[in-house]
Image (cartoon, grey):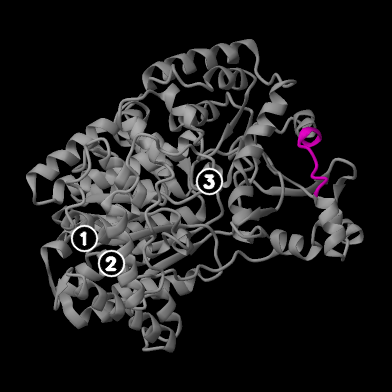
Amino acid sequence: MKYQDLELDPFQIASVEAIDRGESVIVAAPTGCGKTLIAEYAVEESVRQGKRAVYTAPIKALSNQKFRDFRKRFGDEAVGIQTGDVTINQDAQLLIMTTEIFRNLILENSGRLNDIYYVIFDEIHYLDDPERGTVWEESIILAPPGIRFMCLSATVPNIHELARWMGAVRNTTFTVIEETHRPVPLKHSFYHPKFGFISIKGIARKFKNSPEVRKRFMRRKPSSRKIIQLIIREGHLPALYFCFNRRACERNAEMHMQHLDLLNEDEKMQVRRLVDELVYQYGIEGYDRLNFLRQLWEAGCAYHHAGILPAAKEIVERLFTLGLIKLLFCTETFALGVNMPASAVIFDELEKFDGVQFNYLMTREYNQMAGRAGRRGMDDVGYVYSQVIPEATDPRQMERILYGANERINSRFFASYSTILSLYSQFGDDAFDIFRKSLHNFRKGTFAMSKAYQKEEEQIRSRIKFLQGCGFLDGKELTPKGKLAAAVSGYEIQAAELYYARDFEEVSVAQLPVVLAALITEEARSRKNAPPVSNVALKFDAEKTIHKLRQKELKYNIANPIREMDFSMSAPVFAWASGCDLKQLAGFGVPEGDLIRILRMTIQLLRTLRDRIPDPEISDKMHSALELINRDVVDAQAQLEVG
């Protein structure tokens, strides 16, 4: 069977046939097997039925890539996108969105979901994400009954359990289609510059049992120089080199730029032309790192992580897609769904820091990243190299990472305030029938009143009492404050409390983004040395308001209460709101990618509040603040609309 002039694999044929029958489907297959093609078929089938399709993705970078890809495939008019900071053509036949936006549309009972035939959930194993996984569960539980789901996943051992849970929640059958075979097989190797290639048995022989001795060896972390020389010699380019911290990405790229020259003259000219064009279109001529990055890119080398300027990241992705970056040092987010395969993948190490300690990678994480090796139709084999320090590397962990099963998907269900407000105000105590439908509770016996669920329900009831006690709910009815909070979804009780405490009235238009950014900001080690604010009053009344709200939560025994406000990003946020340019912004010592992410999230909150706040004067103030900060490199929509 052929589709788009491609001979389909058996699992793709089975998926297409299930779509033709109008079934909900979960497709589990290794990275790089061609799952996107199935998604495209589901979109076409939705259009054939005279209906629309929604494509959701876990991260905005993936949403943006799919938007561009699908526009090429289906045409500009047929495709739209909505991600919080970008809205283009929102009534299109195919709408790309983040899962959060989809969940919010459900909670709003939006008429925009009435004619949706298929919703495609890309990377559904992201349901296991500790912070954002609950959004997937809520979406599956609450989506209108007529919607079919096409779920795309990496291979996980409990995919059938997931299908049974989804089937029980949605009162339908989910067809499971599994593919374990990779079209391009992978060859896995461990490497150390001194010992060369080394087997797990070889690692076991050198492994030191004493933690103190291991620690000494860990300090002698091997350089990437020899392994890079090896893959160049073997002709295994382009290559992705995964590092688990940003500085390591940059340090490695800088080190190799000095002596690598991976592009011919014609390719260098292509890089110059494309970079000139994109720098002009993105308006980043004033970016202080630009000259250095140009040198790097013209050597065929680059780095990619969340701390760099989004426009620079976009340039790297485009150059890599065109085969003009031969060696890319990147963090693990590059592996998440973004369709950019390479000939080889290298792991700088197989342990990463989780904020508290170093842990070995999960098998699923390793397979997700390793799966980027081997380009279909171009490589016979994909090469995966892992740098190890044999004396300090646990051979049992290597065995698990290489040969163990991917970890199963776990439930992360957590009823947020906006979800509770929306459901409790509609259904009263019947809302608990919905809260009981989590994957975690399904495991204990089909939506039973398990001990674990009783604890969960206790917390939800505490949250309801808190919402009633703080004036968000009157019994089960939403108060005006509750209506605003339910509509915000994300920092909802903080934003509504600040509005009704009249704290937005005490700040200027340029200070308003500072206050909202302080709700969003989470302290990071990388910016502990950021300069304090000199010209912004840090003692806003807002800070007291949020502190009191948090204290009330603690009185009601709420687990995971809201955070205190964090003003560590105030100086650059205020400077940007006051009109500073990109060059001046770099002087604050904050990674520009982090700052732009905070500003874009602030824009999202400003936009929501502007559209929902009943007071026209404050609404106008929100709009003015939005115009101050949504400009130049921060304007996500302008960036996405570039060619």
Q: From which residue to which does the magenta span run?
A: 219-227
Task: Identify the secondary structure beneath mark 3.
Answer: helix
Q: Main secondary structure of the magenta part?
A: loop
Asked if labels 1 and 2 touch by Cβ distance under 8 angstroms, the answer is: yes
Front-most of residues 7 and 232: 232
The residue indicated by pointer 3 is 333
Front-most of residues 147 and 476: 476
Give the image location of residue 369, x and y in percent.
Answer: 60, 48
The residue indicated by pointer 1 is 485
CA–CA distance in space, label 2 to label 1: 8 Å
CA–CA distance in space, label 3 to label 1: 31 Å
Mark 3 or mark 1, whichever is nearer to me: 1
Assess disc 3: are there few (<14), some (14-19) or many (≥20) residues with their C-alpha within 10 Å of its C-alpha. some
Q: Tell me if I can see residue 409 in this picture.
A: yes
Which residue type carries mark 2?
A: Tyr
Give the image location of residue 610, x and y in percent.
Answer: 17, 45
Q: Earlier in the sequence, mark 2 or mark 1?
A: 2
The residue indicated by pointer 2 is 417
